[in-house]
Amino acid sequence: MMIYGLIISIVVVEYLFGLWLKMLNVRASRREIPSSLRGVYDEEKYARQQAYFRVKSRFGLIESTVSTLVMLAMFACGGFAWIDTLAREWVTHPIGVTLVFFALVQLLLWVLELPMAYYNTFVIEERFGFNKSTRKTFVTDSIKSLLLNFVLMGLLLAAVTWIYYRMPQYFWLLAWGVMAVFMLFLQVFYSDLIVPLFNKQTPLAEGALRTAIEQFAAKAGFKVKDIYVMDGSKRSSHANAYFAGFGPRKRIVLFDTLIEQLTTEEIVGVLAHEIGHNKRHHLPVSIAFSLLTSLVMLYLFSLVIGSPSIAAAAGCAQPSFHINLIVFSMLYAPLNVVLDMLLNVMSRRHEWQADEFARVNGLGKEVSSALKKMSAHSLSNLTPHPWVVFMTYSHPTLYQRVLHLESEKEEV
């Protein structure tokens, strides 16, 4: 009963903390825009941005309220215990029970989230001119995502559960090894295997943009071979660019919306920022941090994986891998908040360093201009509350980045 009460308290406190951050952000959004950012929005577009921000904030509050109520109901009404019983009626093998259990939980979450995703896409994003997706694409994407999650998570869960039942004394270490291989595999092959299920990637044609990118890459000592354009406009007008893969499988991916919104010089500036991440080895550092936190999580889980009191919190008489994992994930949530906060602190530092790389290579103003254009196009909030930034932002604010990028200092 004590663990059950602790879980309910964690769920409620987490919801109230999120609500507090939302309220701080809404209040901060009314502040005057800093002088260095006043050119981002004209009066009409700023009014539109404020409307978009408030609509998204209210919708985010509805989403978090629904998910909190569902989680409370699942524990209060024995929902997880009922799904466990259902899974055991269908299969008898312990690994099969785990897979069926999590498949049913995932299916339930998918059904609950689908209407909210539909409303966000075809009402909110449509209203403010961001949505480019059709209903057919939305349905197809949703089904593909669900099936892909079944396959990937199913394979990982099957391997981890098998290790637990065969070698319980080494479970946490061997399971961590499997997760590490899984994570690295996805990192290397994500752009080759996952992205094509949803988007087309075509090589960037010869021309001024490709030449400018290759020239800067050569100047920066960065070997670039594969440059692709992705049809991001198929779903949204938001713009982006990223690097994918390692070593010989490394590629640059540009959204077609980025090419439409920015000049050649600004796109090169954005890629200079991404090259800065590569030069400072940020991706390996981030992966190492994630693997370390995964190791800690699995070790802690191994301490309670067979605890009857943990299973009792979900209304189950006997402990099992999947029930104890569900309960443990709720108990682990406060520590996860702290770890996510530390990851965001590290990520913001990495973004700062990548901006610095672009700036010292003479592209600071181009990156600054690109960020302003992308923020204006996406109706970004220019005055987030400092606490919200500290707790949840993976990037410095636009104001902080512009001051840095347009600075004349040699180092920051």
Image: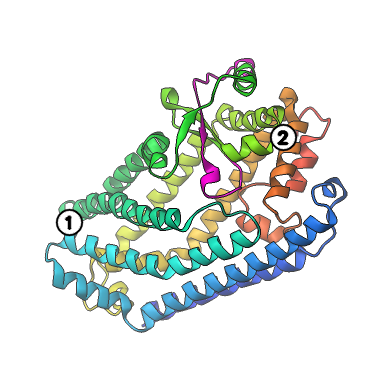
Query: Tag 1: Cα neighbours inside 10 Å, few (<14), some, or many (≥20)?
Result: few
* Residue 342 rendering spot, x and y as whole percentages: 57, 51
34 or 141: nearer the eye?
A: 141
Q: Which mark is residue 409?
A: none
Tell me the kind of residue under disc 2: Val
* Residue 345 rendering spot, x and y as whole percentages: 61, 48
The structure residue drawn at horizontal position 50% and vertical position 41%, both measured from the top left corner, is 286
Tell me the kind of residue under disc 1: Tyr
Q: Where 43 falls versus 369 (above or below)?
A: below
The residue range painted magenta reads: 218-240
The structure residue drawn at horizontal position 79% and vertical position 27%, both measured from the top left corner, is 410
Q: Where 80 falls versus 341 (above or below)?
A: below
* Residue 198 rendering spot, x and y as whole percentages: 42, 45
Query: Tag 2: Cα neighbours inside 10 Å, few (<14), some, or many (≥20)?
Result: many
Disc on the earlier residue, 2 or 1: 1
Q: Is residue 397 visible?
A: no
The structure residue drawn at horizontal position 76% and vertical position 35%, both measured from the top left corner, is 405
- Judged left or right of residue 361, residue 11 is left
Distance of label 2 from label 1 (alpha carbons): 52 Å
Q: Is residue 193 visible?
A: yes
The structure residue drawn at horizontal position 27% and vertical position 46%, both measured from the top left corner, is 174
Q: Circle 2 sits on which residue?
A: 367
* Residue 124 rendering spot, x and y as whole percentages: 60, 64
Q: Circle 1 sits on which residue?
A: 165
Residue 326 figure quarter: bottom left
SS of the residue under disc 2: helix
